[in-house]
Image: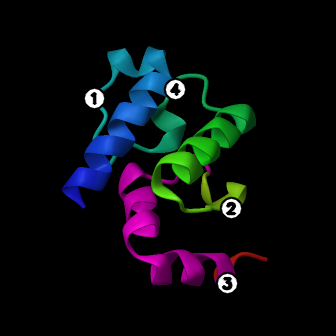
Amino acid sequence: MADTLKKLKVGIEDLFPEVENIAVTGETRLGDIPDFDSMAAVNLQTFIAENFNVAIQLDLLGEDTTLKDIVDFIDNPGKLAAAEKQRP
């Protein structure tokens, strides 16, 4: 988990340079990222797909999603599948 979180944090910092003003941790919610919107979610989705070979649905990358949630989806495909089934 630590390696995945570290790589994800680097990606977040590259995609969203304005995060330099906040502490990015596993508890950081996507909504805490300045200017996080639907286009930012698409950019994050693409980053995750390209760097982790994991396809996360956009509706799972909402403002309340934490980086730890994303790490769990990446590291535990079963959790991602379960979360996808819970969505309408």
Whichever of callouts 1 and 2 sits on the residue coming sooner in the sequence is: 1
**Label 4 Cα neighbours within 10 Å, binned few <14 / some 14-19 / many ≥20:** some
Residue on which disc 4 sits? 15
In the rendered image, which residue does mark 2 sit on?
A: 57
Q: Earlier in the sequence, mark 3 or mark 2?
A: 2
In the picture, measured across the screen, residue 69 lies left or right of residue 6, that is right
Asked which secondary structure carries label 3, the reply is helix
The disc placed on residue 23 is: 1
Disc number lying in front (1 or 2): 2
In the image: residue 56, left or right of residue 24: right
What's the magenta region?
Answer: 62-85
- Among the two numbered marks 3 and 1 on one chain, the one whose residue lies closer to the N terminus: 1
Provide residue 3's location: percent of width, then percent of height.
23, 52
Figure quadrant of residue 75: bottom left
Question: Closer to the N terminus: mark 2 or mark 4?
Answer: 4
* Residue topped by disc 3: 85
Q: Is residue 36 above or below residue 87?
A: above
For image coordinates 42% across by 61% down, the residue present is: 69
Q: Of the residues shown, which amino acid type is indicated by label 2?
A: Gln
Labels 4 and 3: the sequence-earlier one: 4
> Distance between the Cα atoms at labels 3 and 2?
11 Å
Dot 3 and dot 2 residues touching (CB under 8 Å): no
Amino acid at dot 1: Ala
Secondary structure, mark 4, is: helix
Q: Position of residue 67 (x, y in %)?
A: 40, 50
x, y percentage for residue 83?
A: 58, 76
Foreground mark, 4 or 1, reads 4
The quadrant of the rendering that contains the C terminus is bottom right
Q: CA distance from mark 4 to mark 3?
A: 29 Å
